[in-house]
Amino acid sequence: MNRTTMLMTGAALVCSLVCTGCQDDTYEVKTPIYQSGLPADTLKASEFEKAFPLQYAAYRQNDESSVMTEYKGSVNFRKNDGVNPLPKGFRAAQPYLKNLWLGYPFMYEYNEARGHTYAVKDILDIDRINRYSPDGKGNMPTTCWNCKVPNIAQWVAAEGDGVWSRDFNDYRTRVDVMNESISCATCHDTTNMELQLYSIPLKDWLARSGKDWATLSRNEKRSLVCGQCHVEYYFTHKDNGPAGKPVFPWDNGFDPEDMYEYYNTHGANNGPFKNGPHGAAGVSCADCHMPYQKQDGKKFSSHWWTSPLKDPELTACRTCHSDKTPEFLRARVHDIQEKTYRQLLRAQETSVMAHEAVRLANEFEGDRNPRYEELMAAARENVRKGQFFWDLISAENSVGFHNPAKALDTLMSSMDYSRKAVDLCLEATNAHIAANLAGDIKDIVPPILEHSRKLQQDPEHMKSHKWLTYLPVLPEAGLVWEGNVRVR
C-alpha cells in the first residue's frame, strides 16, 4: 500500500438501482416539491426543524450512542482491544487493527462510529488527527472533512482544489460542531428538499461515467446520497491530479479485483458492493435504513440512519419479508454476520503472518535464492493485495450482510494472497525463516492493543513490541487542540 495514499472507511454498499424495493421496476415514486423558505447555502441542521418537525425529531434520534446490536452499534468502542464491558471494548473486536495499520494514522485510534450527528465531534477528538503538534497542524489533509460536513463543497467553490491538500486543523474553527454535521444539507437541496449531491468526488465519477444526476431514478438517488460517504475512496497523489482530492475508483467496475486494478494504476483504493442480493432485488439504502413512518396522520421517511436490527419488530425488513417473524430474520442476519466475522479474523491473522514473513525475509542476509529480489517484489505485492481485500470487508459496515457471498469470497481471496506472500518469502530465503513462522500467530506476533500519539512519545513503549521499533519516537508535546478550540 503506497504511503502517499490513505484508506477512508465506511460502509461499502452503494446500490445504483432503478426501482423501489419490492416493487415492479417500471414504477417510479413521485415526491412533492417543498418550498422550505430556507436559503440555498443553509448548513445548520437546526434551521430545518420548524419546516420539517417530524423529520427533524427522527434525525435527532441519531444522538443516541448507547445501543448495540449483535456485532455493531452506536457505542464508539475501540475496535481493536476486545475488552469488556462496553464502551472500552466489544466481543467482536479485531485485535490486529493496530498491527496492520502500523505507520498509518489509523493505528492510533479506530472506533466504532456513533450516529451521524457525532461525525464532526468524533473526528475532532480522534487520535488520527494530530492534536499534539506544537505548530497546531494536524498533519492530515482537509480531505478528511469530506464525509463529515457539507461545508467542504462551499470551501472548494470559494478557494479551489487547493483546499483538499491544506491542513485539516486549519478548518477546525470554521465548523459548528453539533449543528453542521451530516444532516439535511448533505442530501437535499435546502430550498425545495429535492435529493442532491454535495460530494465532489461522486459528481466527478458520475461525469466520468456519462451519468446525469437529473435523469437518474429516484431510487438510484436514494442510494447515491448515502454513497457520498458510505464507500471507500483514495486521496489523489499530486502526480495524478489535485493533491489530496478524493476519487471514487469505480472506472473499471465494482468488484474488488476491479478496484485493485484501479489502485495499481492510480494509487487508489476500493469501492462498493453493488451486486448483492438486495441490490439485485431493487432495494435502496434508504429502504432499509430510512423506513417509512406514520405520525400525526403523516407518512415520512425516518431520518434516524441506523441498523434495522435496533427495531424489535424489524419493520424495515418485514416490509418485504412479511411472511417471516422478527426472530427468524434476526437469526438469519446474525448467522451471516457470525460466519463473516469468523472468516474476517482468519483473514486478518493470515495477513499479519504475511507481513511478518516479509519483515523476516527483508532482514534475512543468509543463503538467499538467486531470484531473491524478484520473489520479494512479488511477495510485497501479495501482502498488499491480501491486506487490501481484508480491509474492504473490515471497513464495510454490515459484517457481511450487505452481500454475504461477496464478503466471504473477498475474505477467501485475501487469505489466498497472504498465503502466497508467505510462500514467496520462504522461497526467497530458501526456507531459512520457516522456523520463525511456525506456530500460533498470536505467539509469533502478539496484537498491539495499546498505541497512541501520546504513547509514541514514550521510548519505553516503543520497545514494547518488535513491530513498533520500526517507528520513530515522537518528540514530547502536550495537547494543542480540544475539539475545535486551540488550548495551547
Image (cartoon, rainbow, N blue to C red):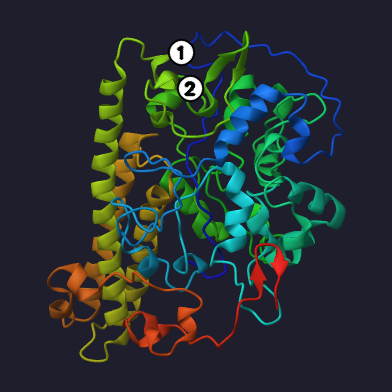
Q: Is residue 358 shown left or right of residue 262?
A: left
Q: Is residue 431 above or below residue 485?
A: below
Is the residue marked by circle 2 packed among few (<14), some (14-19), or many (20+) residues within 10 Å?
many
Find numbered disc 2 in the image and state the secondary structure of the residue it sits on: loop
Q: Residue at x 31, y 62 (%)?
A: 95
Task: Reply above or below: 21 against 67.
Answer: above
The residue labelled by disc 1 is 22
Residue 26, placed above or below residue 440: above
Nearer to me, 363 or 152 = 152
Residue that mark 2 sits on? 283
Q: Residue at x 29, y 67 (%)?
A: 352
Q: Is residue 281 above or below residue 237?
A: above
Q: Amino acid at mark 1?
A: Cys
Pick the front one: 249 or 59:
59
Q: Residues within 10 Å of mark 1 (few under 14, many from 20)?
A: some
Residue 158 percent coordinates (x, y): 86, 53
Q: x and y percent of residue 237 in the render? A: 64, 64
Q: Nearer the viewer, residue 391 or 295?
A: 295
Q: Quadrant of residue 57?
A: top right
Q: Please name the residue shown 72% across and 40% down the image.
A: 198
Tags 2 and 1 touching, CB below 8 Å: yes
Q: Amino acid at mark 2?
A: Val
Q: In whole angstroms, how far apart are the C-alphas of marks 2 and 1? A: 7 Å
Quarter location, residue 167: bottom right
> Who is closer to the viewer here, 164 or 216?
164
